[in-house]
Image (cartoon, rainbow, N blue to C red):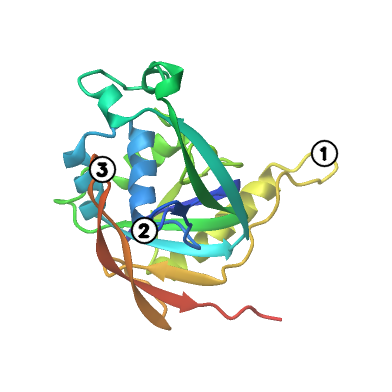
Amino acid sequence: MDYLVFQLQAPLSSWGEPAVGEFRGTAEHPSQSALVGLLGAALGVDRHDEATHAALRDGYGFAVGVQAPGSLLRDYHTAQVPPRTALKGKPHATRRDELAVPKPDLGTILSTRDYLQNAASLVAMQARSSRTAPYTLTALAAALREPCFTLYLGRKSCPPAAPLWPQVFDAESVAAAFARYAELHAAARQTAADKRGRLPLESLMPLTRIAFDDHVVAGVEHDLSTRRKDRLIRRKGWHFGDRTEHIALITLET
């Protein structure tokens, strides 16, 4: 069974949760909708292409291996916005277009936005079937290596801190795929050592938990299941549905 595995590391990341009012929270690990958006950006899919995003959502099973949950950073945010009446009938594809109204008409909105500092995780993808998967795993890996659009981890202010280093290989399960990825990463570091034997970058941190959906072979028993509202329905209207996510807690050896 083939898996695509890649890493997500950044000084700041944010994985949107249902937002009401001025508070914009973050989940503890990447959401399905964020991963679909990441793949879409790598492939060059327009954000308004709902059919392709739906195909990416339904064509693959996703699993996330959390290495470092990160620490919480809370940002008090202000932004100028024009009234809706000022934008009616006018194109506003960019932020500059939105603000091209008389200054007295601009208002201010307040929000509190949460970020994760120095979080790291691995992502494993498995095609649900060759008929429903719109792209091969090899094609997705190539897109992640050379993305069409800039990649970011949840928000535009959160670019990756390290290459995603996507790898496609055969494994019996998600757990086995994560273990195999760690072996390949360690071997690649050894190969890239300089003349003094110094290794580039850092070794991968061990997993603390694995979150997975119903469409992958996890290879571990889950400790709990939860409902998560991160199933993309319509990007244009910011509509998201529920899905079941299973969590397996990993006991670290001491």
Q: Left or right? Give the position of 131 relative to 155.
A: left
For label 1, the SS is loop
Looking at the picture, which amino acid does disc 1 mark?
Lys
The x and y percentages for residue 216 are 31, 66
**Quarter in which the N terminus is drawn:** bottom left
Image marks 1 and 3: residues in contact by CB distance under 8 Å: no
Q: Nearer the viewer, mark 2 or mark 1?
A: 2
Residue situated in front as seen by the camera: 136 or 62: 62
The x and y percentages for residue 27 are 47, 61
Asked if 12 appears above or below 245 in the picture, the reply is: above
The residue sitting at 16% across, 51% down in the picture is 132
Q: From the image, tell me which residue sits under label 1.
A: 195
- Count of marks placed on residues: 3
The residue sitting at 21% across, 35% down in the picture is 49
Asked if 180 appears above or below 39 in the picture, the reply is: below
The x and y percentages for residue 241 are 24, 60
For label 3, the SS is loop
The residue sitting at 64% across, 55% down in the picture is 186
Residue situated in front as seen by the camera: 202 or 77: 77
Q: From the image, tell me which residue sits under label 3.
A: 235
Q: CA distance from mark 2 to mark 3?
A: 14 Å
Residue 139 lies in quadrant? top left
How would you rate the neighbour count of disc 3 (Cα within 10 Å): few for under 14, some for 14-19, many for 20 or more? some
Image marks 2 and 3: residues in contact by CB distance under 8 Å: no
Residue 161 lies in quadrant? top right
Q: Earlier in the sequence, mark 2 or mark 3?
A: 2
Q: Nearer the viewer, mark 1 or mark 3?
A: 3
Residue situated in front as seen by the camera: 53 or 207: 53
Q: From the image, tell me which residue sits under label 2.
A: 18
Q: Nearer the viewer, mark 2 or mark 3?
A: 2
